Image (spheres, rainbow, N blue to C red):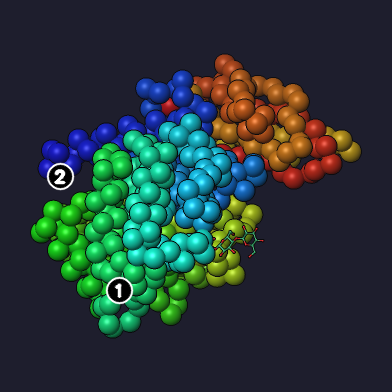
Amino acid sequence: MPSSTSSRARRALVLGLTGLLAAGGLATASGTAQAAGGTLGAAAAEKGRYFGTAVAANHLGEAQYAATLDTEFTSVTPENEMKWDAVEPSRGSFTFSAADQIFDHAQSRGMKVRGHTLVWHSQLPGWVGGLGASDLRTAMNNHINQVMGHYKGKIHSWDVVNEAFQDGSSGARRSSPFQDKLGNGFIEEAFRTARAADPAAKLCYNDYNTDGINAKSNAVYNMVKDFKARGVPIDCVGFQSHFNSASPVPSDYQANLQRFADLGVDVQITELDIEGSGSSQATSYGNVVKACLAVTRCTGITVWGITDKYSWRSSGTPLLFDSNYAKKPAYTAVLTALGGSSGGGGTPDGATCTATYSKQEEWSDRFNGKVTITAGSSPITGWSTTVTVTSPQKIVTTWNGSPTWDSSGNVMTMRPNGNGTLAAGASTSFGFTVMKNGNSTAPAIGACTAS
Ligand code: G3I
């Protein structure tokens, strides 16, 4: 690995772990050794990549949704909240409340944010389509300036233009108010405006059905090549990667990513989801991750949602966590492809642990829970895990551990209270009482982090 790459990888690892530590409420633990690659984000960080997900603001209040997000991911993309219809529903009137909710959640936990998306034919308020050419040009540039300006210096990458090419063999641009009234030059103009609006953000072109080498990806390739030759600012190309049986992961996926990277842009997998289940879905996910890792300039992977429950195509169960937030075989395949391990098995020199929950006594108004912490194949001197309850449940008592709480009061991070040192394979446990307040749902236990 060239030294510039390895120092970038190290920086990304530090950033990734910082995000992870913050995400788990472990900010004070920086400097302690972490279990090697026990989560998607940590494993990706060890490879110098981020691992992100699309997030919807209206689910952030759901404890398991937020806990899974905070434990596993190091980057977020607002699924709908930064789109034109969400932030500028009427001309010149900008509203960022839902977008800010996601941004603030991510930033406070050290996660990166991908901006999605500035100029797109879809989710475009009606008033935009009604404008004449010169007015539309002004409105497009103003939209880019206002939205990028709101987050100036804080967005990792922006999808500046989304889905501007037609499907099929024509290689032509898609009809849209921008294309029809401003012509091909609208894409270049959007990128130039974007560079001036936030010079720190990486500027991406993002599209679907461009994942393999085909007429549509050739057309995008030729545009990027032309931009690079003429000095039009572009830093990255996003490959959405929405796959199913009719549109599987192409055999030339890696070669396609590589040919774009060879033009001098980063490539990112921006909206990955693969319909299916079991081992065939897992194999496809693993292949996507391996392809990204094989391309030095493939800087990160974003899946298009956390749980099948809230996927835009939920019936196809395309994500890594099922509707109950259980990890699917696809999750394990991704983690393994990233070189990570879910703990317990132990990595050669790493301190690892597992955390398992069991319900104890139950009464009409409350129940006791027990979490057993078991060291992996190496001795450990410290551990932590999270216990997330569903509001309006409350944890009212704990024993044999030292708890801290997030601001919602629903997520407890537990660390040792004199029981942090465990021999390889040895166990300890802590306990707690949950007041049901009408809800008997079992708590969600986060990954165990050892030192
Ligand atoms: O929020 C409203 C709700 O109030 C209303 O009752 C309901 C009735 O239909 O609609 C809700 O809004 C929906 C929104 O998702 C939030 O769930 C919209 O109808 C629906 O059109 C919208 O779909 C989004 C889709 O983009 C729109 O094009 C999906 O969530 C989102 O995952 C999807 O994401 C796109 C990427 O941006 C670009 N690439 C393709 C990808 C998948 O289509």
Q: Nearer the viewer, residue 223 or 245?
A: 223
Query: How many marks overall?
Result: 2
Look at the image and tell me whether residue 426 can be seen.
Answer: no
Q: Nearer the viewer, residue 178 or 348?
A: 178
Q: Is residue 428 above or below residue 124?
A: above
| Sequence-first disc among 2 and 1 | 2
Name which residue type carries label 1. Answer: Arg
In x, y percent, where is residue 391?
A: 73, 38
In x, y percent, where is residue 307?
A: 56, 56
Q: Which quadrant of the picture is home to ligand 1?
A: bottom right
Residue drawn at 15 percent across, 44 percent down: 1
Q: Quadrant of residue 164?
A: bottom left
Instruction: Report whether 147 appears left or right of 448.
Output: left
Q: Residues within 10 Å of mark 1 (few under 14, many from 20)?
A: some
Mark in front: 2 vs 1 = 1
Instruction: Report whether 96 appears left or right of 135.
Output: right
> In the structure shown, which secondary structural element does the residue marked by tag 1 occupy?
loop
Look at the image and tell me whether residue 60 can be seen.
Answer: yes
**Which mark, residue 173?**
1
Q: Nearer the viewer, residue 311 or 90?
A: 90
Residue drawn at 33 percent across, 82 percent down: 168
Q: Which residue is mark 2?
A: 1
Residue furthest toward the right?
364
Q: Is residue 130 above or below residue 57?
A: below
In x, y percent, where is residue 11?
A: 27, 34
Name which residue type carries label 2. Answer: Met
> In the structure shown, which secondary structural element does the residue marked by tag 2 occupy?
loop
